[in-house]
Amino acid sequence: MKTIIHDLEFLDKKLFNISDNDKVINANDCKNSCIGCFSCWIKHPKKCIYKDEYSNITESLKGSDELIIISRCRYGCYSENVKRVLERCIGYVLPYFTIRNRNIHHASRYKNQLKLTTYFYGDITDDDKVCLNNLVKANSINLNTSRYEVKEIDNVYTD
Amino acid sequence: MYTLINGSQKNQVSNSRYFLDYISNYLDDYTTYDLKHSKFEDIINSIIKSNTIVLAFPLYVDSPNTITLKLLDYIYNNKIDLSNKKLYVIINCGFREGTHNITALNIIKNWSNKVNINYSGSILIGAGEVVGKKSYSYITSIAINKLKKFSKCIKDNKDSKDIITTMDLLTNKLYCMFANISWTKNAKKNNLKKNDLLIQ
């Protein structure tokens, strides 16, 4: 199973090889932003305080072998909407710290390792590309994924 | 005139706000805005009147947090004229090493190029949760001294290099140990034990 987080107006499932068993999360409908309360770590572990369809993303990631992120590139970063959803996924890792690649990171909650595949679209400069690669690499290390990929796409439907 | 922007999304007093308040001690004519509780229009009006902007935010998922991205988009989409204005940046993270903030800083630099603001320097703070608490004055002294140097650059209208602070007085292992004890202590306030936090 895959979890797909995207900010497209229309998601072409064939283009991204998405099946009916996969969990698709449309970031454009997510209205509640993380407030940094850390409740998903130290009060109700894994659960966001907001009671909406995004509150249990951790469970979806737990059952997935791949996380696919499809986002408009904004200055070498994810779009605001995709970022809002990603910030609500922090319960996927533990609050506790560990040392990985000689730096401090959050410890993994689960033993299974996700593959992380990212697709970016929009106006992407060479500086943006460098940023995107560094960003996804950093995400990959923090999420302790088995591998990561950064891809650029242009044939998507957006508003 | 200076516009200081706190990009933290926290309800309680944030570390980003603490760092801005520290810097404001060196400035005369400034206004501080908490992004979470301010109208973007008010912030933009202040920015237009200012020569210098100081933007502080916490690192979330290796990049600027959502509400900060929202402000960047607002300025970019509305083609606000930021030429001849200086931008200083403060990014803090909970990890010991300030280097974790570099990717987020490069995103801000990309944005700066696109909106024609004069990027003028940054301080990338590691162990932000610790440095933002005055009670640990000895182990935070190196970071605070660097913040002081950064503040003086802002006051004197000079460019600053990108300053990185790391909790040098603690090794990675010690920092992890203290931080992890702190997480368990905080969980206890919610009647949870360590094993409860580890739930699969």
Image (cartoon, rainbow, N blue to C red):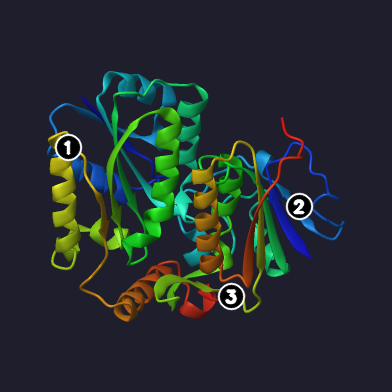
Picture layout, residue B44 above or below residue A22:
above
| Amino acid type for the residue under numbered disc 3 | Ile
Q: Quadrant of residue B48?
A: top left
Judge whether residue A76 can be spotted in this image. Answer: no
State which mark lies toward you, 2 or 1. Answer: 1
Residue type at numbered disc 2:
Val
Residue A106 drawn at (x, y percent):
47, 70
Mark 3 residue crowding within 10 angstroms, few (<14) / some (14–19) / many (20+): few
Identify the residue at the far front of this view.
A126
Q: Chain of mark 2?
A: A
Question: Tag 1, which secondary structure?
Answer: loop
Chain label for disc 1: B
At horizontal 61% and vertical 46% (from top left) the residue drawn is A82
Circle 2/circle 3 CB separation < 8 Å: no
What residue is shown at x 38% (from left), y 55% (from top)?
Answer: B101
Q: Which residue is mark 2?
A: A24
Q: Nearer the viewer, mark 1 or mark 3?
A: 1
Q: Quadrant of the C terminus of chain B?
A: bottom right
- Image quadrant assignment for residue A47: bottom right
Which residue bears the numbered disc 1?
B158
User: Which numbered tag is attached to residue B199?
Assistant: 3
Q: Residue at x 47, y 48 (%)?
A: A35
Q: Residue at x 52, y 25 (%)?
A: B77
The type of residue carrying mark 1 is: Lys
Question: Considering depth in this image, is B91 or A152 the residue closer to the camera?
Answer: A152
